[in-house]
Amino acid sequence: MGLSELSVQKISSVLKKAIREKIAKYKPETDYKPFHHRLLGRDRYAMFSFIHSMNTSFGTSIWEPVAVILAQNAGYQAEKSYKLLGEIDNDTETRITEIIYGLQKAERNADKNEEIKEIRRVIKKGKLLKHPNSNVDLHVKIGDLECFFDIKTVKPNAEGFEVLKKKLLRWVALKLSQDRTAKVFTGLALPYNPYHPKPYKRWTLKGLYDLEGQEVLVGKEFWNYIGGGDVYQDLLNVFQQTGEELRPELNKKFSEFK
């Protein structure tokens, strides 16, 4: 299933809005950097700062809304910046901690289905409360399966991956505290693979995540999963075409840095 023309237009609009807002609001850094400016040139450093600033805003301004459009194009229910409310009792919090400890010490293998079963067995009915881990980047409902994704930068560090794993298990608990029979899946989404064409292999993932169970979806895998089919190349084409349309506006902005 490819992208409909309407979805192409929606994605292009998201990209144009994000870039144009950045162009309108961005002001070159005024910090005095004598070594950087002399080595790279003040204009080149200003361009670098602009692009770096754009990169930091990709999550909420591009990845999340584009993911929602792809999921809706496939006929799924989808929402970005979703609030997952629930309550995690002490026994369940202890079970989550034990799971993480066992994975870290290599006393157990990562198995997302088994981890969900363990949480399902101990979770108690809870109130609809906001939790420190209530913020979900992307919520997609595929049939009766509810998926909760954390869309992350492509190279979190070791400590970051451990924290994220605990968050994913807590999301499972929050959902099951409201409906113990719910079909739920939580995972990490990385928008692209910086090691392409080699596979994404981060030693920090080893042992913590169920890679065979798709707990971590990278690049093409993620976009095709939420898009319900082979939509990855279509998505790249939209970025390419939109980038070409925006080139004159970007060049004009860059000329201001000279």
Image (cartoon, grey):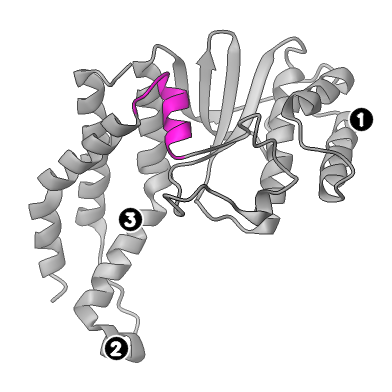
Nearer to me, 140 or 221: 221
Placement of 233 over or under 39, stated as above or below:
above
Quarter of the figure that contains the N terminus? top left
Residue at numbered disc 1: 91
Q: Mark on residue 39?
A: 2
Nearer to me, 192 or 257: 192
Q: Amino acid at mark 2?
A: Leu
Tell me: 197 left or right of 169.
Answer: left
Q: Which residues are magenta?
A: 219-231
Q: Is residue 129 visible?
A: no
Crowding at mark 2 (Cα within 10 Å: few <14, some 14-19, many 20+): few
Q: Residue 233: x percent and y percent?
A: 30, 33
Tell me: 130 left or right of 77.
Answer: right
Q: Residue 75: x percent and y percent?
A: 40, 11
Q: Residue at point 13% right, 46% down?
A: 244
Placement of 224 over or under 54, stated as above or below:
above
For the residues labelled 3 and 1, say whether their Cβ atoms are less than 8 Å apart: no
> How far apart, in angstroms, are the residues tagged by discs 3 and 2?
23 Å
Crowding at mark 1 (Cα within 10 Å: few <14, some 14-19, many 20+): few
Residue at numbered disc 3: 54
> How far apart, in angstroms, are the residues tagged by discs 1 and 2?
57 Å
The stretch drawn in magenta includes residue 88 = no
Q: Choose the circle earlier in sequence order: 1 or 2.
A: 2
Q: Residue at point 51% right, 47% down?
A: 199
